[in-house]
Image (spheres, helix red, strand yellow):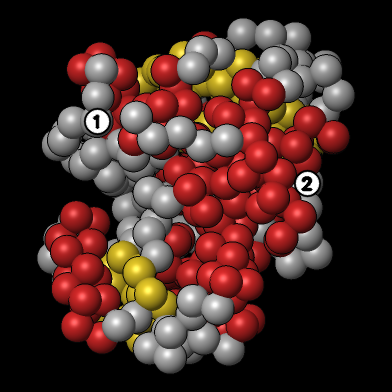
Amino acid sequence: MDQLTYDEIEAAGQRIAGRVRPVAVAPGDDGGRTWLALEFLQHTGSFKARGAQNFLLAHAEAGTLPDAGVTIASGGNAGLACAWAARELGVRATVFLPETASPVKLARLRSYGAEVRLAGREYAEALAACEEFAAGSGALASHAYDHPLIAAGAGTVLAEIRARVPGLDTVVVSVGGGGLFAGVAVAAREHGVRVLAVEPTGSRALNAALAAGRPVDVPVASVAQDALGARRATALAVGAAAQGGVRSVLVDDEAIVRARRQLWEDRRIAVEHAASTALAALDQADGERVAVLLCGANTDPSDLVETNGRP
């Protein structure tokens, strides 16, 4: 089974230093037990900027960036990060998204200068179109989550959280395909930090893989599926979970929506359903010092804003 190493995460941290925003944290309302890691303040609005920078910089160092540029399939956030990182390096980017992609993400993608192509109704269909394009064009194929350089870049956020929350016991993280989870879990294990891996009940790729002992396909039907809509968890994620210190839990869509609404009403923070998925499982986290990673905010906040006294 594929494995990600802590050395790869450390190398990613050195490579992207100064190119991404250090994560900010905010205390919860429970006297210092809970902290919110505000990674949605990252470039492009999500943690994906870390992996995208690491991926492209590593290829630039190796001299393996083709004239055809880079291509990626995404539910939105990985595409945004790839397009942004490509623009920073002067590289062409072609991004494939499902036809169900958020209009907010589409508009931001085009603002970064990426060529946007829509294919299919789910991420898996966009990925197939992306792979066909890469084979025909010679473009470098990146991946939304299933690549060691992507996962290692994402994992750099854990060291920053630990620096801001001394004595961290547990980090709570949403899981889609598992790139963020894999990086965070490997880094967390290195420092004795537990990980609570949270998925929607309707999009449970990691949870199903752990039950089966291997990555398996799952149906996808969740309010958070635009970002947590992978049919299959990466082997990197399954391998990281198998090393211990990880607990997989599921939350229903009602809890995800409620947690997102709570963030808005209490703090005027508008995040994606993918981010509030982690918060929805806070009551299942163990430890005296717990950090909830709020991973992205590329969302349309109109359903959070009250009009004429009603939401």
Q: In the drawing, does residue 55 fall left or right of residue 142?
A: right
Figure disc tally: 2
Other-residue count near label 1 (Cα within 10 Å), few / some / many at <14 / 14–19 / ≥20: many
User: Which quadrant holds residue 89?
Assistant: bottom right
Q: State the residue position of label 2.
A: 24
Q: State the residue position of label 1.
A: 215
Q: In the drawing, does residue 246 fall left or right of residue 294?
A: left
Q: In the drawing, does residue 48 fall left or right of residue 77?
A: right
Q: Is residue 266 visible?
A: no
Other-residue count near label 2 (Cα within 10 Å), few / some / many at <14 / 14–19 / ≥20: some
Label 1 or label 2, whichever lies nearer to me, is 1
Earlier residue among tags 1 and 2: 2
Residue 194, image x and y in percent?
Answer: 61, 16
Residues 141 and 249: in front is 141
Residues 28 and 181: in front is 181
Residue pictured at 49% horizontal, 70% vertical: 82
Q: Amino acid at mark 1?
A: Pro
User: Which quadrant holds residue 216?
Assistant: top left
Residue 209, image x and y in percent?
Answer: 26, 24
Residue 285, image x and y in percent?
Answer: 57, 13
Q: Quadrant of the N terminus?
A: top left
